Image (tube, rainbow, N blue to C red):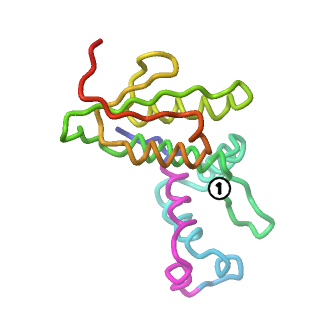
Amino acid sequence: MKISLTDKFLLDLYKIAIQPLGEALSLFPKTMIEAANPELFKMRRAWKKERNKRDFRQMVYYLKKKGYIEASQEKALLITAKGSEKVLKIRLQDTPRKQRKDGKWIMVMFDIPEKKRFRRDLLREFLMFMGYQKLQHSVWICPYEVFQETEALVKEYNLESYVKMFLLDEIAL
């Protein structure tokens, strides 16, 4: 699947953000701003070669407007919580799915209260990205090897008390 230019930019920015500090400081900076964040400037130079200055500014403006990034006073770009969720979605879309070797299916059932509607909608969206198919509105099934990713997602959003996960031998539709 082809990733859009803005999604690739956001993913590259995320990779730089999680890079160890020692690797980021290996270049000799030319200015104080570049000394604060040399990888950002290295990425910016690479993007300038591919696109002109205007495109880079428009992309940063677009990502700021969408709420995926924000600029700090030190002229550094920071990924917001919304941007981190977008990066996770991009990474989930981009990873190939493997069928379970045992032939079992994963079933996820949930009953999340209306007060937590945002988390419920987010869970549905991530289930769809991971390859789950909707059996009912709150019952989803999947033949892929994504049990651990699903479990991690449920724990991350504190939904353990609302979500039940099962391994099924067969499904009679």
Span shown in magenta: 8-28
Which residue does the image show at 44% across and 30% down from the upper left? 108
Q: Position of residue 142 (x, y in %)?
A: 34, 30
Residue found at the very far right of the displayed protein: 73
Instruction: In the rendered view, tell whether residue 124 sits above or below residue 45.
Output: above
Relative depth, front residue between 17 and 36: 17
Amino acid of disc 1: Ile
Which residue does the image show at 50% across and 42% down from the upper left? 89
Quadrant of the frame with the N terminus:
top left
Residue 13 inside the magenta-drawn segment: yes
Which residue does the image show at 70% across and 76% down from the upper left? 33
Relative depth, front residue between 99 and 91: 99
Residue 23 inside the magenta-drawn segment: yes
Instruction: In the rendered view, tell whether residue 75 sits above or below residue 156.
Output: below
Question: Circle 1 sits in a helix, a strand or a loop, which is it?
Answer: strand
Q: Position of residue 90 (x, y in %)?
A: 47, 44
Residue, disc 1: 79
